[in-house]
Each structure stands twice: as C-alpha cells, then as structure tokens.
Amino acid sequence: MTDIHELATRFHRLHDGPHALRLANCWDAGSAAVIARAGADAVATTSAGVAWSLGVADGDRLDRAAAVDAVARITRSVSVPVTADIESGYGETPDDVAETVRLFLTAGVVGVNIEDAHEGGLRDVTAQAERIAAARQAAADAGVDLFVNARIDNFLGGIGEPEGRTAVALERAARYLAAGASGIFVPGVADLAVVRELADGIDAPLNVMAGGGAPPVPELETAGARRVSVGPGITLAAYALAGRAATELFETGGYTSLTDGLGFAEVNAMWSR
C-alpha cells in the first residue's frame, strides 16, 4: 500500500501539471476500481452516489460513520490518490469538521471537498472560513498535507442575483484560501467567460464540474480550470443503464443493453490481487 504522505504529495502535484486534472467520480469500491483501471490519476467520490448506493438521499443525510466506512472501502480498492466529498463536514461546529477530517484521513483520503451550502442558502462566510481552518488544522495535526477543496455553492444553488454571483464567489474564495483551503470548487458554472474570470481572480487551482451543458474539458482547461470533475454524472449514467436493461428484459425479453458490459472474469480479477 502506498504511503498516505506520498499519495498526498502526488495529488497536490496533479493540480500543477500541463493539463487540468480530470476526475471521474465514483460511488463505491467497484466503481472506483473500474475508474482507476481506465487510467485515472486520482479518484474522487460523489457524496450523492455514495449516499444513493447506501439507500439514503443526498444532502447531509448520510450518517458520517457510514460515509467513512464507504470511503475506506474505496481507498482500499485503488492505488491512486482518493479525494472525498464530505458534504458540509458532517456537523455544525468547526470541531465537528475537524473530527470528520480526522476520520476520513484514517480512511485513507488525501483530499476533501467541503461545501458552503446551508439551509437553502450559503453559510456565513466567517463561519465557513472557521470550518475550513479547522479542517486544515486537523490535517496538520495528523501530519498530512491534505488538499482542502473549498466548494462555493451560489452558482449551483442559484443563490443570489446572477450578475452578482461571480463577485460573491471571488470574495468567498479569498476568505477560504486565507483560512487554509488548497483549491476552490465552483460547480454549476457553464459559461466559459465566467470560468475565465473566476480562474483569473482566484490564486489557487479552480475546480469546475463537467456535465449538464458545461463545455468540454479542453475548453474549460483553456479558460483556466485546473481540475474538472463530473459529480454524480457517472452514477446517474450507470443507474440509467440498469433501468434500460431491466426495461428491455421486462418488456421484450431482450438483452441487447447488456452486450457492452465488462466480462465477469476481468471484473472478478480486480479483486483477486
């Protein structure tokens, strides 16, 4: 097993390469292994996909212990760095966030996303900065150079007037970076001009989310994004395939939806190490 400090160093460096880091988000050990096998430099989790796989709705509803257990299974299934979506930190206080980070570090992650969405709006920026600082201190106490990806949710949540969202995101980004964030994640941005403005105004790697009408990765990269993830997109695509295959079986008795599936032996071999 690769040392967590080596994985953390490798993950940080992936944000400094000639191209944007592309992250295909997984939801369980199997999807993580398949994504790593496809050539991933790192693996990210999707909190929505993890929650759904455990029969729970997304949105801070999954129990922290269950989330940590699921992510630990993911880190054990791959040899590349893993970054985890820890939603809003699984708790209301900075101490809660610090404990969450300690638990996820024990599970083997070298990065976390922490969001500022709260009760239909955005958490107070000072309170969120304190939570990020707590995450950073917990990682420092553990001796791990954790990549803290601070997520700003005003674009994704449609919060505030559209013309003011970029300024709000830039203001929050500066506060979060001062508190110890390593990078900034602004999901919900599809306009390349806005991506460019955010990238120019943020003194750290900018993460945007592909899918849902967003431009292709090369265009996002040219606009300044240093990290592109797909959120629950692959999870949803997998569920859609399961639905199509089941519908075909029930309605026509056919199996054409299954013809492009991976072979049993090759998948089973992923766990025969």
Image: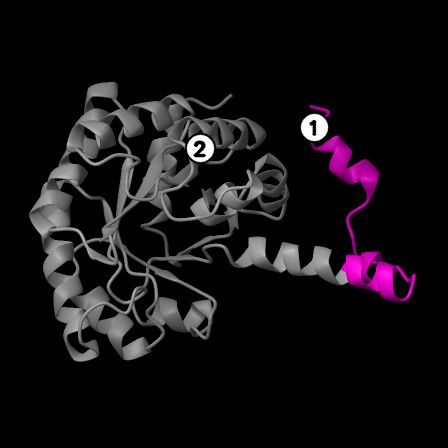
Amino acid type, label 2: Ala
Amino acid type, label 1: Trp
Above or below 40: residue 225:
below
Residue 5 in view here = no
Q: Quadrant of residue 68?
A: top left
Q: Quadrant of residue 249?
A: bottom right
In the image, residue 128 lies in the stretch drawn in magenta: no
Sequence-first tag of 1 and 2: 2
Which quadrant of the figure contains the C terminus? top right
Residue 241 image position (x, y, % from top left): 70, 59
Under circle 1, the secondary element is loop
- Toward the right, the furthest residue is 253
Above or below 159: residue 72:
above
Picture disc at residue 13:
none
Above or below 29: residue 260:
below
Q: Which residues are magenta?
A: 245-273
In the image, residue 264 lies in the stretch drawn in magenta: yes
Q: Quadrant of residue 264?
A: top right
* Mark 1–mark 2 distance (CA, rounded to whole Å): 22 Å
User: Looking at the image, which is closer to me, 5 or 172?
Assistant: 172
Q: Indicate which label's residue lies in the foreground, 1 or 2.
A: 2
Picture disc at residue 67:
2
Under circle 2, the secondary element is helix
Question: Residue at the spot x=57%, y=58% of the render?
Answer: 236
Residue 26 image position (x, y, % from top left): 53, 45
Residue 148 in view here = yes
Question: Residue at the spot x=78%, y=52% of the render?
Answer: 261
In the picture, measured across the screen, residue 131 lies left or right of residue 104, that is left
Residue 211 image position (x, y, % from top left): 48, 67
In the picture, measured across the screen, residue 259 lies left or right of residue 16, that is right
User: Looking at the image, which is closer to me, 238 or 224?
Assistant: 238
Q: Which residue is mark 1?
A: 271
